[in-house]
Structures are given as C-alpha cells and as structure tokens.
Image: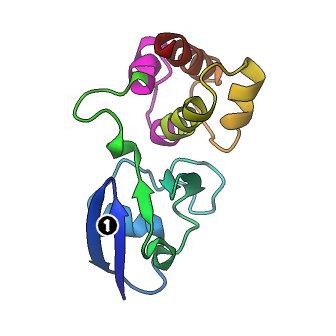
Amino acid sequence: MLIRTTVNGIARAVDVYPSASLLTLLREELGLVGSKNACEQGECGSCSVWLDGEVVNACLVPAVQAEGRAVRTVASLGNGALHPVQEAFLAAGAVQCGYCTPGMVVAATDLLERDPDPSEATIREALAGNLCRCTGYQKIVAAVRLAAEAAR
C-alpha cells in the first residue's frame, strides 16, 4: 500500500503492508530509528512522535493513518545540533540507557512548546505516558526544568 506523508518536513511516498504501524514505516522503511520499538502496546512512550502536531505512540498508529498528514520525529529536533531539550537532558544526567530518551524528549519538547514555564506537577503529568526504568524520573524532571529555564 502506498502511503504519501510528510516526515520531518520532507514529502515521502512509502510502500508498506496494510497492517504496518507508523513505527514500522519510520524505522524499517525510512531508516528513522530515533523512535524506539519497546513494548508495541502503547505503554512505554519510547516510540512517541508528532502526528499533525499531536504526540502519539507510533506503535499504535496504523501507517495508513499517516496518509496526507505530517509526521515529526525526534530526528527533526536541533537541525544538526542538539535541541535545547536534548542539551538539558545531557546536562542534568537524565540519559542513562537511552531507550526512553527519544520519547521523553518528544514529550518534554511538546510540553515546553505549549507551556514554557511548567510546574513540576505539569511536567510529571506531561511525561506520564513515558516509562523509564533507569533514572527514577528526578533527573528527567530536572532536565525539563533546565530546558524551560534556558528558553526563558
């Protein structure tokens, strides 16, 4: 099945199986491996991307739903350099194994694009759909706060 979509600002035409997920389209067909394949059940958030500006779990979205729509992945951030949220994650030590990091960065970036000065409760709520088994979340929350401060 031919899917025409825009991914990270580039128009794409991709031939995929009708049952393929958006995550499969991104990783296997386009080679965009930033979004991770962890649970395939929409529970962990490691595959988070924007679909027409809304954060979704790419593992749950059928690729056919990307037809005529805009997809933005973690790879769209930074334009060849680190995005301020990515820099903050490094500075705060919020990156350990790195598996959850792309989804956390997408969720954090989405939050800061909507609310440039979020409270800790708002940060935790925005990250609630993303699971991390390494950090205990304190450093991740600190990274989002650091990114918000840097943006101000």
Q: Is residue 42 left or right of residue 33?
A: right
Quarter-of-image position of residue 56: bottom right
Residue 25 locus on image (x, y percent):
37, 69
- Badge 1: how crowded within 10 Å, few (<14), some, or many (20+)? few
Q: Which residues are magenta?
A: 85-103
Q: Is residue 9 above or below residue 110?
A: below
Inspect the image, locate mark 1, and give the three-letter code of the amino acid beneath it. Glu
Q: Position of residue 13 (x, y in %)?
A: 27, 76
Helix, strand or loop under label 1: helix
Q: Residue at x 68, y 36 (%)?
A: 126
Q: Is residue 28 above or below residue 83?
A: below
Q: Is residue 17 shown in magenta?
A: no
Which percent across, then down, holds residue 53? Answer: 53, 52
Residue bearing the label numbered 1 = 28
At 27% from the left and 66% from the top, the residue drawn is: 11
Q: Nearer the viewer, residue 95 or 2?
A: 2
| Quadrant, the N terminus | bottom left
When asked about the image quadrant of residue 110, the answer is top right
